[in-house]
Amino acid sequence: MKIFGWQADFAGCAWYRILLPLAALREQGQHTRFGNTLKEEFWDYDVIIAQRTCLEGPTGIFQRIARSKGNRPKLVYEVDDDLLNLDQHNPSVEFFNNPKIQENIIANLQVADVVTVSTAPLAEQLAKYNSNIHVVPNCIPAALLDWQHGYHVDRITVGWQGSATHTGDWARAANPIGRWFTQARQQGVPVEFHTVGSTPPSFPNLHPHRRTDWVGHDRFYHLLDWHFAVAPLAPTLFNNSKSDLRCLEAAALGFPVVASDVVAYREAVQHGKTGFLVSDPKQWDKYLWALTKSPKLRDEMAQAGREWAATRTVEGNAWRWLEAYQS
């Protein structure tokens, strides 16, 4: 099967939803290409995957192929977020709330032969526009399971990666996490934060706090020197459709995670085994202290997390993508 992945960008969504699956399928004998330009040479492929296509020009191409007579490629519309219900604090909300952009997204969903999404709640949200939706969860490269990360032995480093899109998520967790951090420092416990990406305005004002600019997934893993990670997420309509990727990455790399008890993370975090789920803001302190004080607990959770993450490798789940494209 000849498959072309028409990626929307070169960021994390393209990495996990286009590049990794198509690279794995190539290793398994399929003919795959990917790029951000749909040249006419790819129009005779068996499958074209369009990643959240919504601009006027690309939408026109997608619609023209859909309407073409005869033997045309199967069209897959790939979307990893609920772009029709962004939170108001999201920096992209003005773009995606544009009536024409929303009209294009819906039109492309409707003419697609197949729609692929990362979660069941997102499939439910989009079911009104297309009846052939396949849930294909985000997966990690198997090599991450053997990654040996380093960390400082004279301090406890807490990690988070993300962008300003998480302003609403940190708004709920900043005070309790900041309170724990301040108490730890006052008690002489050497804790620090290390964040990767751009910290949202609601992130607590903590010191010491190291911030590393985003460098792309080919170098991202080399930066991480955490002992454990945090994953705040607000219970919003948009977040209900998000994937468990943040917790999956942490588990694969051997980081226990303290995460919000929300739909996206309830199956990814086995409470008390691979990390902790916070259902009340006061619990941030409790669980962060537990991981801070016990290296043994961190090691046990890291091992259990990697065992779970081993079930979600892209190499072991590439068949799910192929099954969707063949449906």
Image (tube, rainbow, N blue to C red):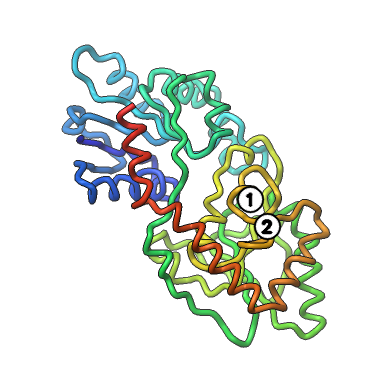
| Residue at the (62%, 73%) spot, across then down | 298
Kindly indicate the quadrant of the structure image that contains residue 78: top left
**In the visual, does 35 lie left or right of 193?**
left
Kindly indicate the quadrant of the structure image that contains residue 179: bottom right
Q: In the rendered view, tell whether residue 180 sits above or below residue 174.
A: below
Q: Which mark is residue 288?
A: none
* Cβ atoms under marks 2 and 1 closer than 8 Å: no
Name the element at disc 2.
loop
**In the visual, does 237 lie left or right of 128?**
right
Label 2: how many residues lie within 10 Å, few (<14), some (14-19) or many (20+)? some
Three-letter amino acid code at the position of disc 1: His
Residue under circle 2?
271
First in residue order: circle 2 vs circle 1: 1
Task: Point out the image quarter for the C terminus.
Answer: top left
Label 1: how many residues lie within 10 Å, few (<14), some (14-19) or many (20+)? many
Residue under circle 1?
166
| Residue at the (77%, 80%) spot, across then down | 185
Name the element at disc 1.
helix
How far is the residue under mark 2 from the one under mark 1?
Answer: 23 Å
- Please name whichever residue, 5 or 299, is drawn nearer the observer in this view of the structure: 299
| Residue at the (57%, 29%) spot, across then down | 84
| Residue at the (39%, 18%) spot, across then down | 111
Q: In the rendered view, tell whether residue 230 sits above or below residue 320.
A: below
Q: In the rendered view, tell whether residue 45 sits above or below residue 180.
A: above
- Please name whichever residue, 103 or 186, is drawn nearer the observer in this view of the structure: 186
Q: Please provide percent x and percent y for residue 60.
A: 34, 22
